[in-house]
Image: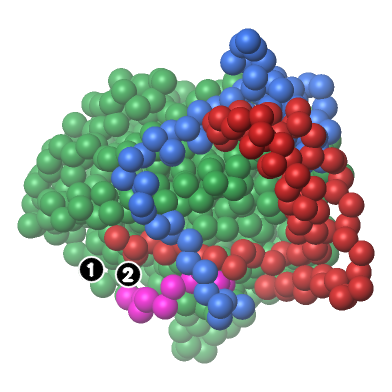
Amino acid sequence: MTAPDVVAPEEGALSSALTIADAQTALRDGTLTATGLLREAYATADAVDETLGIYLSRFDETAQAAAAAIDAAFAAGEDPGLLAGIPLGIKDIISTTEGETTAQSLVLDRAWGAGVGDAVVVSRLRAAGAVITGKLTTMEYATGVPDPTKPFPIPRNPWNTDYWTGGSSSGTGNGVAAGAILGGLGTDTGGSIRIPSAFCGITGLKATFGRVPKSGCVPLGYSLDNIGPMARSARDCAIMLNALAGYDASDACAVEVPTEDYLAGLDGDLSGLTIGLDRLLGKAPNRDPAVDAALDAVVDVLTGLGATVVEVELPLWQELNAATRITSRSEAFAYHAPDLRSRWGDYFSATRTGVGAAIAFTGADYVQAQRVRRVGQKAVAALFETVDLIITPTSSVAGWKIDELDSMADRFGSMHTGYWNALGNPALALPMGFSGQPRAGGLPLSLQIIGRPFTESLVLRAGDAYQRVTDWHLLTPAAADRSETAVVAS
Amino acid sequence: MTVEAAGQPGPDAGMDEPEVALYTAERLDVLLEIAELPLSPQRKEKLLETLPDLDQKVAKIRSVALGETPPATAFDARWS
Amino acid sequence: MHSIEEQFEKQLDQALESNGLTPLPEDRAALLKAFTTGREQAALVFSVAEARYEEPDLIFSASLS
């Protein structure tokens, strides 16, 4: 099935629908060079960044050197790695050797990142040959909403620039959607990979808690934080996960579970799988009717791929979302308390009131939340004895206007991501349709696919199978159009 | 990841003074309200006697220079 | 008898003071709303009957470093 009114990339243009998988092939057959790919990526960023607010800082010089080295290696007949020559951005709460890590805040001591150097995940991407292009916009300390009174860009949705990208991995979301990068790192404590993926129409994976080491990342919720890939497709996320996943002793929460080749099972076949659908009706204060039409189409696609789709009801919905909120706020407040006491006004408005609200909770409330997480894990594990995967909408709405963000507190209930942070399961967000017309102000809609702990292979297989027969993930916003013709080998 | 060593007081270090005195009857009433614990006046009086000590302990925890130190606990998604 | 709103305001004020926080006046409304929601969320997690004798998913290890 293809999406109606699909806007296909212009023939011969460097498509912003270029995937990492496409680029891997093109770099190896000589159609593209790493240098040319990077040049085009930066040219796209030059054209759109002032409007979209993708980057906080760019690493043009080091990225160009890295790309040149990759080209030299290919020319010498070497294969410099899985992600060789692929331009990737890093959310600016993850430390890199180049530049500063700011957490998009006036508060973070810039010396912190300098002391860390590359986070483990960044080292792994570089070891795989990735070209690190720069640091991407986020929400302050990965929480809250943009604050126009602070000296940082407001990230805008390339599908409709009146709308927010979602957060907190905002620059990764709009950067991939606009074609300024082919992929990037986000983090997810309550949905911060999946929400910008949903709103910007790209694919993002929150892996199982502990699958990807998070050392070298500014913490928001110690028992909730995940670092993960955001890119155009499930296949691209699988490629990135192959580089990112694996135990590292520097992260006390990392789990010593063997990794897999996350590409190996992407065969397009969902025969024999039972998939549980919870439409989450009545769970959100707002619901776009286009979500339900899109879900109906998803069921048709998955059934056509051989799966059996059954209706399920997720247990303890309100309670587990409350557990995520109590946990994330309490853990964040423990980290921020000294700075909130002395530098309250330097924080963004939504950050300080959101994190500061943790004073509502007692120590017993926090421990109780951890007990409820355990009850939830048992209940959902029981559900997973009847299904192989679970699907839900990622959000009941397609986004919010930037000038409505001060009422965000009422709107988080429309996003259906935090439940899975309470439990730790892997969850993939991928595009499933549009509310309105693409390229005419319409906004993407997103499907969430969830698996048992450490079953990223199956989750990605389902996402990839869906994307083999649909084109939603290949649609590009008008903001990503480029007037130049294809980058050729140079 | 760089981790600062937690500051450790020497054996002769004085106890830090709490930033705000928590051991008033009025404050205790508010805390009991939050905890939904109905106590008799006699039990409240006894509880009030223990608060300065707790107060000091909280202040001591807050005075430790933790830097980026994560908690001594971890969450495991596999528990079921 | 204080109204529930007055109760939450008093609890918020005390919590701000005991945590050493001095918010700006423009933050008051958002803080009170978040505090109130927070107390509701705390009540919700304590309403889970199955959690009464459940262990928390909080693994302490003497060897964590």
Q: Residue furthest front?
A: B42
**For residue A467, side relative to residue A69 (left or right):** left
Residues under numbered marks 1 and 2 in contact, where contact means CB atoms less than 8 Å apart: yes
Q: CA distance from mark 1 to mark 2?
A: 7 Å
- Near mark 1 (Cα within 10 A), the count class, few <14, some 14-19 or many ≥20, is some
Residue sitting at x 61%, y 78%: C65
Q: For numbered disc 1, what is the local secondary structure?
A: loop
Residue A173 coordinates in the image, percent (x, y): 52, 46
Q: Which residues are magenta?
A: A251-260
When asked about the image quadrant of residue A281, the answer is top left
Q: Which chain is blue?
A: C
Instruction: Please say which color scheme the image uses.
Output: by chain
Left or right of A149? Residue A233 is: left
Name the residue that disc number 1 marks.
A265
Decide which of B8, A266 is in the foreground and name it.
B8
Tell me the amino acid under the disc marked 1. Answer: Gly
* Residue A437 pos. (x, y %): 37, 24
Residue in the image at 37% along x and 46% along y: C52
Residue A348 versus residue A18 in the image, above or below? above
Query: Which residue, given by chain and number where applicable, does mark 2 sit on?
Result: A262
Q: Is residue B74 visible?
A: yes
Chain containing the residue with disc 1: A
